[in-house]
Image (cartoon, helix red, strand yellow):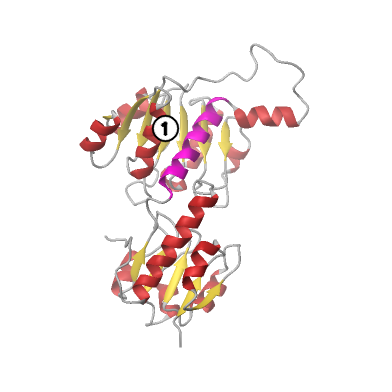
Amino acid sequence: MADKVLVTREIPAAGLRLLGDFDVTVLSEKPPERDELLEAARGASGILSTVTEMVDAGLMDAAGDGLKVVANMAVGFDNIDLDAAGERGVVVTNTPEVLSETTADTAFMLLMAAARRLGEAERVLRAGEWDAWGPMQLLGPDVWGKKLGIVGFGRIGQALARRASGFDMEVVYHDMRRNEEAERDLGVRYLELDELLETCDFVSVHAPLTDETRHLVGEKELEGMKDTSVLVNTSRGPVVNEAALAEALAEGRIFAAGLDVYEEEPKVHPGLLELENVVLAPHIGSASIETRDKMAALAAENLVAVLRGEEPKTPVTG
């Protein structure tokens, strides 16, 4: 009898067709209810999950002793209890690298849209409120030649730095560990977080969500930023304190923000929804056709490898 594999959401065919040798259950396009997820997991040898499902001890126990692998279709894995997986001998994998360039595109898109007030401008146009070009209309700061601070300098942060070089931006970064090789290759400088926030015109957050990075950018950090600065977050919502950000934007303590992730997705802080000076996207950082195909395929390849007794391409360690 073929191993049972649970795919927790509808995913691109590029991933599903790699699972043809297994007994595959695919749940709906929408995030499953907890009870549905627990029931569907029963007897599964492998779970291909997405960021919207909490893969904790309860779900692993519902699957049973035969669960061998959880393949997360994401670069982040804060939705998976790694301790519980380790205790049960369950291999956890993710999908790094394949989404770095596309997510960096999204970050730069949000940076430019927030700076140049694109969302607000489109709303004015669609509402029929634009009656003529005006020399003082919808002014925002230039992007080219400005100073960009990148918080979290992994693959996505470095991909953003490469994009910024094409706009002649001065790029600095902060990370828990310095990367002197990347500094030489990309012509960037390391700064402590406080100095980065105080001196940069644009700040883009790319830190993974951990206990240490939760609310890494909060009231104190926002207070230290320029009132002309723009904040972008495409990492994980809780890395930025949404309530503090909404207040800073409403009071004009920073110029604008561009967000693709939120603290309690799919909920968005109501204060943000009321503001014109924030561009809001529904977690589309990796949402290109090519990248989602690659993510689904890599997640499936990892799952298949473990079930065949082989080493997965991208295991999560630590």
Give x and y (percent) for residue 293: 50, 57
* Residue 256 placement, left or right of 87: right
Q: Is 85 left, or right, of 79 in this rendering?
A: left
Is residue 110 located in the magenta-colored stretch of the structure?
A: yes
Provide the secondary structure element on which disc 1 rests: helix
Residue pictured at 52% horizontal, 76% vertical: 24
Question: Splitting the image into 4 quarters, where does residue 60 fall?
Answer: bottom left
**Which quadrant is the C terminus positioned in?**
bottom left
* Viewer-closest of 84 and 136: 136
Could you tell me residue 16's position as x and y percent?
A: 51, 68
Q: Residue furthest bottom?
A: 1
Where residue 277 sits in the image (x, y, percent)? Answer: 58, 29
Residue furthest top as drawn: 135
The reply to whether residue 264 is in sight is: no
Secondary structure character of the magenta stretch overall: helix
Q: Position of residue 148 (x, y in %)?
A: 39, 27
Read off the magenta span.
99-116
Taking the image as shown, residue 104 lies to the left or right of residue 250, namely left
Q: Which residue is mark 1?
A: 163
Residue type marked 1: Arg
